[in-house]
Image (cartoon, coloured by chain):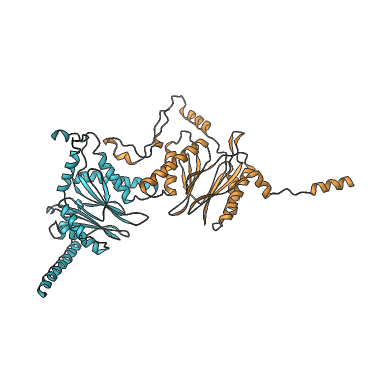
Amino acid sequence: MARYDRAITVFSPDGHLFQVEYALEAVRKGNAAVGVRGTDTIVLGVEKKSAAKLQDSRSVRKIVNLDNHIALACAGLKADARVLINKARIECQSHRLTVEDPVTVEYITRYIAGLQQKYTQSGGVRPFGLSTLIVGFDPYTGVPSLYQTDPSGTFSAWKANATGRNSNSMREFLEKNYKETSGQETIKLAIRALLEVVESGGKNIEIAVMTKEHGLRQFEEAEIDAIVAEIEAEKAAAEAAKKGTPKET
Amino acid sequence: MMIDMSGLESAPSLLGVNDELSGGFLRAPSFELPSTIDFDGFQKEAKQTLKHAKGTTTLAFIFKEGVMVAADSRASMGGYISSQSVKKIIEINPYMLGTMAGGAADCQFWHRNLGIKCRLHELANKRRISVAGASKLLANILYSYRGMGLSVGTMIAGWDETGPGLYYVDSEGGRLKGTRFSVGSGSPYAYGVLDNGYRYDMSIEEGAELARRAIYHATFRDGASGGVASVYYVGPNGWKKLFGDDVGELHYKYYPVVQGTVEQEMIEVSGA
């Protein structure tokens, strides 16, 4: 098997592209990221590894804008992310220039996925080691969308998804608890999913919310703490209610 | 000089690692300079030889109900009328029209190419391309061939999500958004009639009649325009051809021959 993972243009005898699979491993070691699509709001959340005391946390934003109406969060190699994000931003502007229209979410996702695929079929390069969650509102129809891409270059649309560390537990939680939400409820669902795998508290979670009117808004630590407190209170109430009913029977 | 076909590619070519950053932009073609003593004079001469005076009349205007597009149908080679039945309104797709002025081959080819690009855009984005976008695609291609002798003076008219759209695009690379345009050697005459009779809130019949009249008057005075006056209307459901009248017959329709007076005079003279 070792002979089939050097130049990644080579398939292994059983049909694997090992470099792509190793890239997926890198993604699995990256920080947790979650995205939830509501009817009028889309929420992106990422796990923030505890910042060093002297580090300026504002310079390590993990949720970024690709255009006024599109945002991206990713899990995996952050340096690769920077390159991909820069190319995507240029493509957003280039599209505006050539067809006088902002990109749709699907278009830019297809572009990013296409880039990731290109690097799995060229000589002398390695794949990008990241999966992205791309969210936005389509310019004319106003429909909210959430897409995910991965190192192999595939992409698909999701109602809610998670990637990175412990993404399986987050996805299970989302599958159990997802329903069509809007506004604050969507934000709470995203945070609850993240809290499944991340230590509770505003300094370990980064949240950004996108709405059609206001674009992308990053939440302050205090705001996140407030919502987390609400969620904990709801959880406690639910626990108490559960404990209460058996006694009555 | 090598003919550059990069305008025919529909997507930036997938090159290797070194070209990534510029991959998003259209790459302008380059060509070798001819080895003459006086390059500027040579360039001027070359431009003159290739400059077809755009012998035609085309016009288009936006009004309350949509876009009206009209053109004549004469093709001339100097003083020789080579055809009286040229289709100068090109159907790019069911909701967009282009007009032809300048080199017939250039207009036909690049409009067809634009139609291909519009269709590819639809397939890729599951949405029709806007008139602004389509005209921009054409303008960018024509700009990249600037100075190489293309002769295209076209108007792109259509209906998209934002309503009626009209753009003028030419082979110098210019692109203008507007509500009233006329292109060709007969355009001054057409503008006179068009600007005089134009009102934004015309009905479709009034608009079509105005367009037809303007083309007729241009063919009357301009030797390089004639044949058939075609009038198309572009509305929310696409384009529809409204008129296709021979301008000779139109002349007698607008100015019928008054019978009788001359013969009476002659009888009187012989009587006296």
| Residue positioned most to the right | B272
Q: Where is residue B144? Give x, y as percent.
A: 42, 37
- Residue B192 visible within the image: no
| Number of numbered tags placed on the structure image | 0
Q: Position of residue A141 (x, y in %)?
A: 36, 56
Query: Seen from this angle, which residue lies furthest bottom?
Result: A248
Q: Residue furthest left?
A: A247
Which colour is chain B painted? orange
Pinpoint residue A221: horizontal percent, then vertical percent. Answer: 18, 60
**Quarter of the image where one finds residue B4:** top left
Chain painted in cyan in the figure:
A
Q: Is residue A64 above or below residue A114?
A: below
Query: Would residue A138 appear left or right of B75 to someone viewing this image?
Result: left
Instruction: Give x and y (percent) for residue A168.
Output: 16, 53
Could you tell whether A72 is left or right of B99 in the image? left
Q: Is residue A140 left or right of residue A247?
A: right
* Identity of the residue drawn at 66% across and 45% down: B249
Q: Is residue A170 visible?
A: yes
